[in-house]
Image (tube, grey):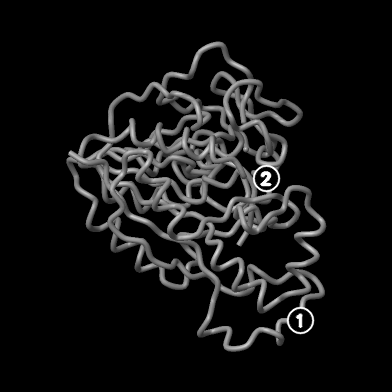
Amino acid sequence: ASAGVQGGGGKHRAGKRQRTEPPTLPLEPTDDVDTDEPSTAGGGGKGAGRVRKRGLQTQGVRYWDSMAKRYDREIYDSFNEALNKEAIIKILNAAGGKDKDCIDFGCGVGKYLPALSTRFKSVLGLDLSQPLVDMAMKTVVYSGSGRSRQRKLKNVTLGQADLSESVSLPNKAHFACCQNVLLEASNEAHEAILRNVHAGLVPGGGLMLLVPSLESALHVGKALPEKMQRAMEGCDGSDASLGHVPRRGVLTQHFKKDHIDRLLRSAGFTPVSCQKLKYPWRHEFGKGDDETSVKDKAKNPPWDWLIYCTRPL
């Protein structure tokens, strides 16, 4: 798996240039998207070296902007690599509809966009990082380049936004995704993001939420105790009792099942289901780790919490 702060649809994340007003979305794509270098198009992306001075997401700006080029190598793809991906598909199939609108909060490079596009009338993808939005535009929404460039997902629009701030949406959605976005070790940030997601849904609308599991982190710690000890000692602010567990040196929020349930209820949601979304052990191993030390790897893989909840009518 991975780590970080708010960003785009995988476990590692990050900000944007300072603005005096929250952005109005959607931001329509331009014809000159180029992800060979991080872009600052669209009125203020998270260009390397800039740190947001508004909102709660001030950490990790450089990190997530720099991640665009190596996203596929370093960020766990929860949609395509989950061992029980059918759990995601089941939720999407039940929630979808050709008369329904969807918002992907923290869309990253767009791993969920094709599946959402085929199931909903319209999809708005938002991410804190402009370079990640640019990558999603180039590789997922469009195909080809220059005069041969064609739009593949005609019902998908992308925009850049700090999800901890109020965002002016074109309309409320019937369904929302928020996959590995609540990563910053800040309860204030979690509450702000969930309030904005709640405000972006129609009454009765559904939310599919994915968050790192503290129970899983402790499970991994028992299997790889030396690795966990090194990680905790090498990262300031680490505190397993608060769910602040480092991932690749980045302090990352992990949630106990009852913690995320309380957080969702306090934001106005009604939790419907919470299940394990399991991922391969290889995402927990680093250089020098003894993979043979983990017993019954196939039977006891690590996991994130996959939650479905609704905004009450």
Between label 1 and label 2, give the one nearer the viewer. Answer: 1
Splitting the image into 4 quarters, where does residue 120 fall?
Answer: top left
> Where is residue 58 drawn, in percent x and y?
65, 31
Three-letter amino acid code at disc 1?
Asp
How many residues crowd around disc 2 within 10 Å: few (fewer than 14), some, or many (20 or more)? Answer: many
- Residue at point 49%, 54% (across, down): 211
**Please, what secondary structure does the residue beneath circle 1 have?**
loop
Splitting the image into 4 quarters, where does residue 8 fall?
Answer: top right
Q: Is residue 96 left or right of residue 177?
A: left
> Where is residue 169 drawn, in percent x and y?
36, 25
Splitting the image into 4 quarters, where does residue 146 fall?
Answer: top right
- Residue at point 68%, 57% (across, down): 247
In this view, the residue farthest toward the top is 20
- The quadrant of the image that shows the N terminus is bottom right
> Where is residue 212 drawn, in percent x and y?
54, 57
Q: Which residue is mark 1?
A: 290
Q: Which residue is mark 2?
A: 67
Q: Is residue 255 above or below residue 60?
A: below
- Residue at point 78%, 73% (across, down): 226
> Where is residue 166 drawn, in percent x and y?
44, 23
- The quadrant of the image that shows the C terminus is top left
Q: Earlier in the sequence, mark 1 or mark 2?
A: 2
Q: Is residue 20 above or below residue 297?
A: above
How many residues crowd around disc 1 within 10 Å: few (fewer than 14), some, or many (20 or more)? Answer: few
Three-letter amino acid code at disc 2?
Met
| Total tally of numbered discs in the picture | 2
**Please, what secondary structure does the residue beneath circle 2 have?**
loop
Q: Is residue 44 above or below residue 116?
A: above
